[in-house]
Image (spheres, rainbow, N blue to C red):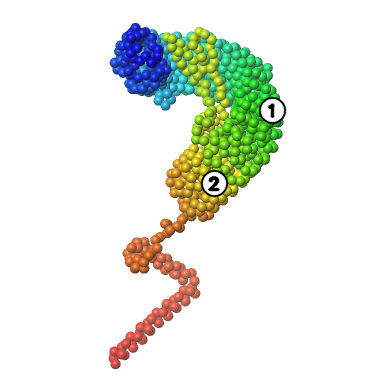
Amino acid sequence: MSMKHGSESLLRLNKLESLDLHDNIFNWSIIQSLRLLTSLKSLNLSNNAVEGSLPTKDLCGWKKLEELDLSWNHFEGILPSSLCNLTSLQLLDLSSNEFTGNISSWMAGLTSLKYIDLSFNHFEHFSFDSLANISRLEFFRFECDDSKKVDVETENSGWVPLFQLEFLVLSHCNLNKLSNQVPTFLFHQYSLRALDLSYNNLKGPFPNWLLVNNTRLEFFSLNNNLFMGPLHLSLPLNSTYAMDVSNNQLSGHLQGNIGNILPKIRILHLFKNDFEGYLPFSIGNMSLLGILNLSFNNFSGEVPEESLAGCFLLQILDLSNNKFGGHLLSSTFNFTELKVLKINDNQFSGTLSPKCSLMSYFDVSNNKLSDKIPTSICNKTNLDTLILRNNFFRGQIPCETIQIQHLDLSQNSLSGSLPSWSSERLDAVHLGHNYFSGSIPKAFLNISDLSTLDISDNRLSGRIPSAIGELDLTVLLLRGNRLRGIIPTQFCQLTGIKLMDLSNNFLSGTIPHCFGRVFSDDQSLFDLNSVDLSTMPYEYRIFQKVISMPILGISNDDLSNEVGLLYEYYPQDESNFITKYRRSSYEGDILAYMSGLDLSCNNLTGGIPIELGQLSKIHALNVSHNQLTGSIPKALSNMTELESLDLSHNSLSGEIPPQLIALHFLEVFSVAHNNLSGRTPDMKAQFGTFDASSYEGNPFLCGLPLERHCTSKDDSPPMPTKSSDVKEEKWYKVDQTVFFTSFLVTYVMFCLGVITVLYINPHWRLRCFNLVEDCMYSCYFSVVITLRKLAVRLYN
């Protein structure tokens, strides 16, 4: 119904039974008119921009209402008690709003409910006791936001439910937070078709009884809990299409007959557990298997062809981060449907020879593969991502034209010159840590969509081509080569750059002043897709309403029809950058928030451009080990998000700007080995954490944390201006206790010293006694003679 007719049109439709107003913009004046539609059975107000709380009276007139959908709005506040008057209600969807309070009080009266969705609100508590009288309930969904988990209690009174659920989603909640046990009311549920108890910190042994009780179970998810022990499935599960028990603490060997227990399985997630041992041969009996993820476990041994030969429909195979060894999957494997193969971080050896015509994602990094890269790689038109990092491949890159989008051949033994590619698809190229030599050919840079270029730690020489500045790069890593000449001014066009590392070369000239405009503050320029593979939606149609329920990446409107897979893998671009004196790896979305400039270990001259202070969002700046002169610009204090600043081993002079103490995020700071003078910055904020090593090698610096104290006018005692000031000084202003104590100690020590010397040397002792005797006689005769003369005068 169009909204342009307004409330007057709605008043005339008093016999209307179904009204769909989703994806509109309206206010409560429309809803006040809707309350007059007493014959209304279905009302859909989803996905609007409604704000505020629900009215307390306007809902009472809808006695015949069977479906109420208020999802995806901005409703807030406590739900009105008038909802309990909707006794005919069968579908209630309040998901994705901002409702608060306790919802258990009014729900008990809605005995006709079949479908309830309370997900993504701000409720404080929910008890399953309120559902005790709802005998027709089939669908219950309560997903919580990670930042606001709701306490959901199912064990208050040990009740036995009247309903038989078909779909139950209780994820990301504080489910039975006191016991962390699987809800016991599920012992009495025998009709479940989809069950999701993920992200609840549930613990205990694997609940095999859930699968025994519910033989119709099609979708089963217990991922991100704390279940431990073996995974034991006692009965064949002929209806189960998808199972996810990843991110638990399950251990032991996979049961040998698992392929017979799950004959119709299409998605099997066992990753991030503690499984060990060999792969069972029975996996080959899973003829419908489309996705198998065994990554991040302790599986070992070879991968026998018999284990996977029967999985003709396999689209995604992830064996990464295990201990598999032996030769890589041979060319006899007939994976005609395989699109994603991740076997990285294992111990595979031999040569690269898998045959998969439809493959789009191939990662064999961190293994022991050797020999040359086969030329067949170049001709694969469907291959989007090829990661061969950290192996033992040698020789040259065989491809002249390449259709790959994300290429990582770093940390191998490849040699020769860089290829002259012509490609319109390449987005990321990683060739670092190899033995490439020669100059960087201009034809190598003929890649219009390139965003990441890593050719660091090779043997490249010559000048940096100015054509690099014409690319739309976000990451440029050229460190550890033999490049010479100046930094091209065309680099000033790299306005979307996030990481630039030109360190450890032989670059000369000055730092371009325009670098202050290079690093963009717009985080959206760096767009890397990351998909949580455990939360892709499948759909269930009920009451002519399509409901999205995030379980296991399966799409299906009618569960009796064919199930389709929705999974896609996106390359997580990874780049290494040295900051805070350590090499850090930035991957995926984290890379979007990191920015840094490293020009260290070159022959750069001139001063530090003031314009660098415009890089207010940069996190790391390193210009150490150059020949820079001049003073440190005060404008560097404008780099408010700076975490690492290294200006050491240059010829900088002048004072350290005290304004730098405004850099509150600074963790690493060094101006060591320069010609700086004056006072060090105050020991405040982050500068209170830096020790003397940050300032060493500057003989004219003073102040804490250095041992050299400053002797400026402010620190020396005040000089008298008038002579009368000295006369006015009083002796009693001196601390008398200190004065007499020191005088007495000095006198005693002097006397003891004289006595000691006289005792040791008898000659000096005799001379001293004679001197004392002479003095005594001299004084005696002087006094006697004086007295006699005085007496004679008085007598006369």
Label disc, if present, on residue 391 of the rendered structure = none
Amino acid type at mark 1: Glu
- Dot placed on the residue nearer the N-terminal end, 2 or 1: 1
CA–CA distance in space, label 2 to label 1: 42 Å
Name the residue nearer the viewer: 202 or 101: 101
Kindly state the secondary structure of the residue where label 1 is placed: loop
Q: Where is residue 515 in the image (x, y as percent from the top left)?
A: 55, 41
Q: In which quarter of the image is residue 581?
A: top right
Residue 129 seen anywhere in this rendered image of the structure: no
Q: How many labels does the image show?
A: 2
Camera-side residue of 676 and 180: 676
Point out residue 91 in the picture as x, y percentages from the top left corner: 39, 12
Q: Position of residue 12 (x, y in %)?
A: 33, 9
Q: Position of residue 335 (x, y in %)?
A: 63, 16
Q: Counting other residues with Cα less than 10 Å from the Cα at mark 1, is it few (<14), some (14-19), or many (20 or more)?
A: few
The residue located at (70%, 31%) in the rendering is 396
- Tell me the amino acid under the disc marked 2: Ile
| Location of the C terminus (image quadrant) | bottom left
Q: At 55% from the left edge and 11% from the top edge, which residue is drawn?
A: 264
Q: Report crowding for label 2: few under 14, some 14 to 19, many 20 or more residues within 10 A (C-alpha).
A: many
Q: Which SS class for mark 2?
A: loop
Residues tagged 2 and 1 counted as in contact (Cβ below 8 A) = no
Residue at the spot x=50%, y=41% of the render?
614
- In the image, 257 versus 732, the foreground residue is 732
Query: Residue under circle 1?
Result: 400
Residue shown at the point (52%, 25%) measured from the top left: 530
Which sits in the foreground, 199 or 551?
551
Q: Residue 608 carries which label?
A: 2
For this orientation, the residue located farthest to the bottom is: 796
Task: Check the picture and name the quadrant holding the N terminus.
Answer: top left
